[in-house]
Amino acid sequence: MNVQAFIALFLISIFTTPTSAHFFPNMSSLPPNLIPNTTAGAWASFVKLLGCHTGQQVDGIAKLKQYFQYFGYINNSTNFTDDFDNVLESALRTYQRNFNLNTTGVLDGPTLKKLISPRCGNADIINGTSSMNSGKSPSASSIHLHTVSHFSFFAGKPRWPERKTDLTYAFSPENQLSDSAKSVFSRAFERWSEVTPLTFTETASFSAADIRIGFFSGDHGDGEPFDGPLGTLAHAFSPPSGRFHLDGDENWVVDANLINSPSLVSAVDLESVAVHEIGHLLGLGHSSVEESIMYPTITAGQRKVELANDDVEGIHVLYGSNPNFNGTSSSTPAERDTNGAHFVGPLMDLSLLLVFGFVLMFF
């Protein structure tokens, strides 16, 4: 380990405090107050902004600007107002384009539903460059003879060295994870190992591991604080950092047999999160393909762990294919859920969202 890496690990150990996360064996073990929960979440207050557009001044718009700043859509600013200005409209249009929504520049229902979804804490735009490749064509006249890929990479396309095909990982000792929780990560690593030449081995040495996994609450010293249940759920750093942080305030479900549920729940499928964040650890950015693992957000009651073709194509650019890989992802388009990405969380039906939004306007 070089001196810089040692110093970084030392500082992390001093200024961060791992937390005891909230784990549940399966969906049936969730307490009643978590099922259903249609209004919880870090960004639930955004519903009162439904229909907002340029030229309006509405209480809460400043917080929306902070949201867009956090995920890279607005450049740094310390003086946000509640004016729906041109800066916010531009950010909103870019967001809509990245998520394949109608680029209206208006905070419409579909856009609002996406905004309040639990999501990965990694930014969509870094240093002014989008890490998402929009699924929309650049122009209406564009003709694509083949399927367009929408995977993306971190700036500079970092990856683990070619000579390092077996990556070690370890869990923060302070978290004291159960074997069942640890096995979730083992399965998640295996998803990527199946399609690449990489292998992943757990080690007991947290400081010496290539990938270091920990659950934290709030500000944990890396400049990307967590915000409590159902906001930013996890984030991971590009290679070769190896840092993988999850929000300890979430309600994590560890049962591998969790299936998609129509219920609105305030819980998160741990394996779905892990598969997505490992993609970041290996060098993938976000994708605008909604069925891909690397899509940033999630729908209600969803378990999503199968790599889509877009994920496989992207990781092959970085590392090549596993010699035993048969050339197709483990799920076909017909088998995949097409509604979102990588977490279980609450999301309102559009009709409920509209009603709730109108009610809030009178308070």
Image (cartoon, helix red, strand yellow):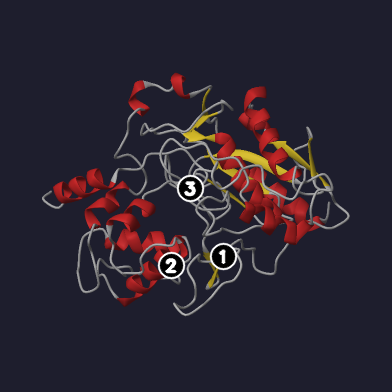
Q: Amino acid at mark 1?
A: Ser
Marks 2 and 1 in Cβ contact (< 8 Å): no
Work out whether 272 lies above or below 7.
above
Asked if the residue under mark 1 is in contact with the one under mark 3, i.e. CB atoms within 8 Å, the reply is no
Q: Disc 2 marks which amino acid?
A: Arg
Residues under labels 2 and 1: Cα distance? 13 Å
Tell me where residue 342 appears, x and y as whole percent: 52, 44
Q: Position of residue 163 (x, y in %)?
A: 88, 55
The residue at which mark 3 appears reads as 338
Place of residue 168 in the rendered image (x, y in percent of width and height, measured from the top left)? 79, 41
Near mark 1 (Cα within 10 A), the count class, few <14, some 14-19 or many ≥20, is: many
Q: How many marks?
A: 3
Residue lying furthest left in this view?
Answer: 362
Q: Which amino acid type is marked by label 3? A: Thr
Residue at the front extreme of this rendering: 145
Q: Quadrant of residue 334?
A: top right
Of 179 and 296, nearer the camera is 296
Residue 159 visible in image: no
The residue beneath circle 2 is 97
Residue 131's label in the rendered image is 1
| Residue in the image at 28% along x and 66% along y | 106
Q: CA distance from mark 3 to mark 1?
A: 21 Å
Direction from residue 276 to residue 219 in the image, left or right? left
Q: Secondary structure at mark 2?
A: helix
